[in-house]
């Protein structure tokens, strides 16, 4: 999906939201009188289902249903309402990565990691893209960063092992797969890769 298509999708979602928001404010006169008796502190935003958290929740559901375009549109709207939120940026990047738009995903991952340098999942995901692009040094740096944050995640060791295989460092790769299995003995993928070596 191109940047232009993403912008158009975001614009469509924004206008749909504005129409829905307007419809929600239309009430009959009796309801308006009843509402005026409520606390002055309550506003339309208080009960809006379109706050960033609600948008992210809806995006998560869409993602689980494999509706990546809807999930992406919801997350882009959430990002517009809550800019500089590392979790939202990470989710946008992850969906872009799932749809094989790695260059665009990497842009969002970079924004996310600048906001949350201690997120091992961002580092792991960035390493995955760098590995796919053949940028092994950058991939290695992000996997090291991920291990510094949490050295008990077997997936990081597994990913590191895959990178080392690509780099033709098979003995080091064996060590990484073994570390993954030491943490999670039922990690079948790590077992399979270790057996290949």
Image (cartoon, grey):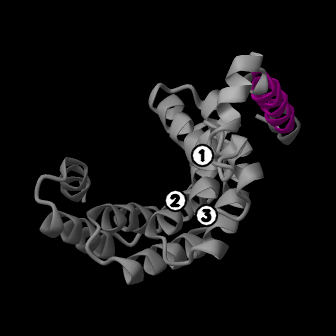
Indicate the position of residue 131 as horizontal and vertical percent values: 55, 61
Question: Badge 2 local density, few (<14 within 10 Å), some, or many (20+)?
Answer: many
In the image, residue 6 above or below residue 159: above
In the image, residue 87 above or below residue 76: below
Q: Residue at x 21, y 49 (%)?
A: 192
Indicate the position of residue 190 as horizontal and vertical percent values: 24, 56
Q: 136 and 32: which one is in front?
A: 32
Question: Badge 3 local density, few (<14 within 10 Å), some, or many (20+)?
Answer: many
Look at discs 2 and 3 and give the one toward the viewer. 3
Q: Which residues are magenta?
A: 7-23
CB under 8 Å between discs 2 and 1: yes
CA gap, disc 2 and disc 1 = 9 Å
Indicate the position of residue 97 as horizontal and vertical percent values: 60, 46
Residue at far left of view: 185
Task: Specify which label sits upstream in the sequence, 1 or 3.
Answer: 3
In the image, residue 12 above or below residue 48: above
CB under 8 Å between discs 1 and 3: no
Q: Which residue is mark 1?
A: 97
Residue at far top of view: 28
Indicate the position of residue 143 as horizontal and vertical percent values: 46, 73
Q: 32 and 145: which one is in front?
A: 32
**Element class at badge 2:** helix
CA gap, disc 1 and disc 3 = 16 Å
Q: Which residue is mark 2?
A: 125
Task: Specify which label sits upstream in the sequence, 2 or 3.
Answer: 3
Q: Residue at x 70, y 18 (%)?
A: 30
Q: Which mark is residue 86?
A: 3
Look at discs 1 and 3 and give the one toward the viewer. 3
Q: Is residue 88 left or right of residue 7?
A: left
């Amino acid at each position: 999906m191109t940047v232009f298509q993403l912008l158009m999708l975001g614009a469509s979602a924004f206008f749909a939201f504005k129409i829905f928001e307007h419809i929600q404010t239309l009430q009959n006169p009796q309801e308006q009188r009843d509402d005026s008796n409520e606390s002055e502190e309550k506003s339309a935003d208080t009960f809006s289902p379109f706050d960033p958290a609600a948008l992210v929740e809806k995006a998560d559901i869409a993602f689980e249903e494999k509706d990546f375009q809807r999930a992406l549109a919801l997350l882009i709207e959430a990002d517009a309402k809550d800019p500089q939120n590392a979790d939202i940026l990470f989710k946008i990047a992850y969906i872009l990565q799932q749809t094989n738009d790695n260059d665009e995903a990497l842009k969002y991952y970079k924004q996310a990691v600048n906001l949350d340098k201690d997120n091992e999942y961002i580092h792991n995901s960035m390493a995955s893209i760098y590995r796919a692009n053949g940028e092994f040094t950058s991939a290695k740096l992000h996997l090291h960063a991920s291990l510094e944050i949490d050295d008990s995640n077997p997936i990081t060791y597994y990913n590191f092992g895959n990178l080392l295989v690509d780099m033709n460092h098979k003995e080091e790769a064996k060590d990484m797969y073994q570390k993954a299995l030491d943490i999670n003995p039922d990690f079948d993928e790590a077992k399979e890769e270790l057996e290949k070596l």
